Image: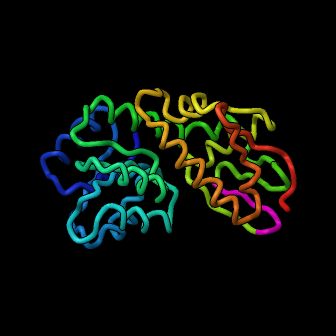
Amino acid sequence: MFKILLIEDDQSLFNEMKDRLGQWSHDVYGISDFSRVMNEYSEIEPELVIIDIQLPKFDGFHWCRMIREHSNVPIIFLSSRDHPTDMVMSMNLGADDFVQKPFHFDVLIAKIQAILRRVYNYNTEQPELKMWAGATIEQERNRVTNERGTVELTKNEMFILKQLVEKKSKIVTREELINRLWDDQRFISDNTLTVNINRLRKKLDEIGLGHLIETKVGQGYAAVEGESP
């Protein structure tokens, strides 16, 4: 059982999603005051957040930014708009997935279950600390530290970095990363992986490690060994 916060102002859709997710034993919470989303978020302390983009007061992007200032909780965006920029914006803000309305409930539930399995189970299979290129990777805290400082990663970014580092400079294909991240390649676009990789590199650049995530054209990516310059 997980606590899911659904930030959705369409009451009929909220009720239907709450009913469907309740069948999987999840507790679904809504928002009573859309000007106080962060207050209610703090009270609930959810383990997954689903946010509609179009909301009263402030849009979903605003609340995603606010949540990411305090937490790496997994976030799924919902949108009735079909602008490709919405998906890119969502991923750049640290969302874990993006679902276009109207959607099939079985697909949404499959995405939710895959994210919950990945986020709350995979760390138990690996040691908490791992060394790479002179940096310490703290998997359970989703952060990377070296002498230059510390960067916080999202769950997806940490998962990608973990897959690359474990291969010890060997190439990990795009298809392998997509399948491991989202369980089923049909449910994710190739562009989403590119956005996640670019965001990971940008964060690692802050501590001089971004250049060590190499793109192998036509093959995939590799986390090469070496100290930061």
> Measuring 75% from the left and 68% from the top, which residue is drawn there?
149
Seen in the image, is 104 located left or right of residue 205?
left
Q: Residue furthest left?
A: 12
Residue 56 % position (x, y): 20, 66
Residue 140 % position (x, y): 65, 49
Residue 169 or 157: which is nearer the viewer?
Answer: 169
> Measuring 71% from the left and 52% from the top, which residue is drawn there?
138
Residue 115 higher or lower than 86, as above or below: above
Seen in the image, is 192 located left or right of residue 224?
left
Residue 187 higher or lower than 43, as above or below: above
Residue 10 % position (x, y): 16, 53
Q: Residue furthest front?
A: 217
Residue 125 or 149: which is nearer the viewer?
Answer: 149
Quarter of the rendering occupied by the N terminus: top left
Report the span colored magenta: 141-148
**Is residue 145 inside the magenta stretch?**
yes
Residue 70 higher or lower than 2, as above or below: below
Seen in the image, is 114 located left or right of residue 212?
left
Residue 189 % position (x, y): 44, 37
**Is residue 23 inside the magenta stretch?**
no
> Measuring 81% from the left and 49% from the top, which residue is drawn there?
132
Scheme of colours in the image? rainbow
| Count of residue discs | 0
Quarter of the rendering occupied by the C terminus: bottom right
